[in-house]
Amino acid sequence: MDSKIVLITGGSSGIGKAIGTYLSKNGFIVYGTTRNLKKYSDFKDFELLEMDVRQPESVKKAIELLLKKESRLDVLINNAGVGITGPLEETPNNEILNAFDTNFIGPLNVIKASLPQMRKQKCGLIINITSIAGYMGLPFRGIYSASKGALELITESLRMETKDFGIECTCLAPGDFATNIAAGRYHAPIKENSPYKESYGAILNSIDEDVDKGGNPEEVAKKVLQIINMKKPKVHYKVGAFMQKFSIILKRVLPDTWYEHLLIKHSKK
């Protein structure tokens, strides 16, 4: 069988780049996307296409170019995303909208543009990269949690809507991995006169430390390959440190207020 064609949004760095590089080494034909192709003129790991997932026309143009080159699309990996932290009260609405545009509406734009080809082929796989943070409302990361949680839920709907067409859909939720996400994350500034100054400041330092100490993103890539090779992928997958994955189980079994207490205690470590 010919090599499968894979499209990875946000493929120029971080988890997306790790997935693309790993799949390329394992015989897949990989295309990644980036908002600014000129910034990556020396990128050699796999081919990049210019795409801004927030702009439907940009998405359509990139998908058309891919299909012109390859005539098919076997695997779509929605990985492009942005981080955002801050007290809800002090986070500007334009930053909230940008986070949802990128993390939630963006993947939907790419899915909409990809489905006609997958239906035509009568097969295809969509993997939405979400986050373990999408399973719980984290203090000062509520917008990020909500955007990733929304993507988890809509994947459940999409699976049922597309099952008759031979298309499989699933989510993969990573925990903390050592990437450059912190550099691109929007941080609401810590204001001197803010009632959240001490609590938000302490948690912000903890968030960055968790990312810096995170695992090798190739772990995510290996999980992606496992999913691609499955005949019938499950609805949800998680990858990350044991306690990060276990935190989801704890939420299911503990009373809400107990779980809330654990999150607050962990955030203040």
Image (tube, rainbow, N blue to C red):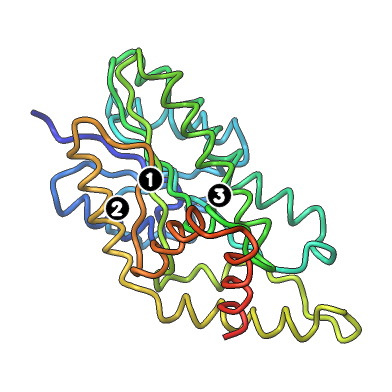
* Side of 29 relative to 82 (left or right): left
Q: In front of the other: label 3 or label 1?
A: 3
Residue where numbered disc 3 is placed: 148
How packed is label 3: few (under 14 Cα within 10 Å), some, or many (20 or more)? many
Please report contact status of discs 2 and 3: CB closer than 8 Å, yes or no. no
Nearer-N-terminus badge (2/3): 2
Q: Tag 2 or tag 1, which sits nearer the N-term?
A: 1
Query: What residue type is disc 3 on?
Result: Lys
Residue 255, by quadrant, is bottom right
What quarter of the picture does the N terminus occupy? Answer: top left
Q: Residue at x 42, y 44 (%)?
A: 49
Rendered view: 113 above or below 126? above
- Report the disc number at residue 8: 1
Q: Residue at x 52, y 60 (%)?
A: 254
Image vertical order of residue 210 relative to residue 137, above or below: below
Q: Pick the residue in front: 43 or 78.
A: 78
Q: Which mark is residue 20?
A: 2
Amino acid type at image mark 2: Gly
Between disc 3 and disc 1, whose residue precedes? 1
Task: Label 2, secondary structure: give it.
Answer: helix
Q: Please say if the residues under marks 1 and 2 sit with CB atoms less than 8 Å apart.
A: yes
Q: Few, some or many C-alpha atoms within 10 Å of disc 2 (few <14, some 14-19, many ≥20)?
A: many
